[in-house]
Image (spheres, rainbow, N blue to C red):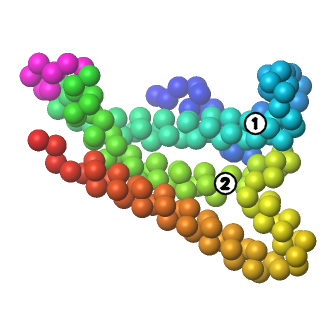
Amino acid sequence: QHGSYITCHNGYTRDVCAVHMLFFFQAEDGIRDLVRSRGLGDVYKRQAVAVIGFTLNVAAYNARYLRTAYNGLDQDELEAARAQGLSGLQVFRHITLPQVLRLSVPALTNQAILNLKDSSVAFLIQYTEFFAEVQELATRTFQYFKAYLIAGMVYLVLVSIIVFAARRLEKTVLRPMY
């Protein structure tokens, strides 16, 4: 059974909802006072809302992936390791963590790619992120095809970096540990 935080974020809110709820919450009382007390402007408040909203949502999905991977472990193997005299930390470090990473890296990679692509919903709270900047540039220069082609190439490069890093991580956790 998953906790209420994970259930709420996975079942109810998407990035759009989470960002809007936080934005309107901060407009009423929350983040506004915290940010204003540090002398940050409106742009930074919107950036803070976007980062917090995406982080809360991503954390819930990642927790579900990691928990599912943990639940897929052979509990007898963990019990046998404890019976051999390994401490809880040793069991976690040498047995649990490598197996959980091995099982969850593909899902976490997909989530990272989705997060990159979904980051453009921040424009809904009037935060100008990368894609909104591209749209503004295309509107000013009337070179829509070129602007969107370059944006697509930037996203492709970023996704390729994520996939490359994930493959390296998979190779690291797939190595036999003797």
Q: Quadrant of residue 21?
A: top right
Q: Amino acid at mark 1?
A: Val
Number of other residues with Cα within 10 Å of mark 1, as a class: few under 14, some 14 to 19, many 20 or more? many
* Marker disc for residue 118: 2
Label 2's element?
Answer: helix
Question: What residue range appears in magenta?
Answer: 80-88
Q: Is residue 143 magenta?
A: no
Residue under numbered circle 1: 49
Q: Looking at the image, is 151 positioned above or below residue 98?
A: below
Q: Along the horizontal axis of the image, is 98 left or right of 115?
A: left
Residue 30: horizontal and vertical position, in percent? 81, 22
Residue 50: horizontal and vertical position, in percent? 73, 41
- Name the front one of labels 1 and 2: 1
Q: Amino acid at mark 2?
A: Asp
Q: Looking at the image, is 150 positioned above or below residue 114?
A: below
Q: Looking at the image, is 93 positioned above or below residue 111?
A: above
Q: Nearer the viewer, residue 70 or 88?
A: 88
Q: Looking at the image, is 145 positioned above or below residue 95?
A: below
Label 1's element?
Answer: helix
Residue 71: horizontal and vertical position, in percent? 34, 35
Q: Residue at x 55, y 67 (%)?
A: 157
Residue 141: horizontal and vertical position, in percent? 88, 76
Q: Residue at x 20, y 18 (%)?
A: 87
Q: Nearer the viewer, residue 11 or 135?
A: 135
> Does residue 135 appear in the picture of this structure?
yes
Number of other residues with Cα within 10 Å of mark 2, as a class: few under 14, some 14 to 19, many 20 or more? some
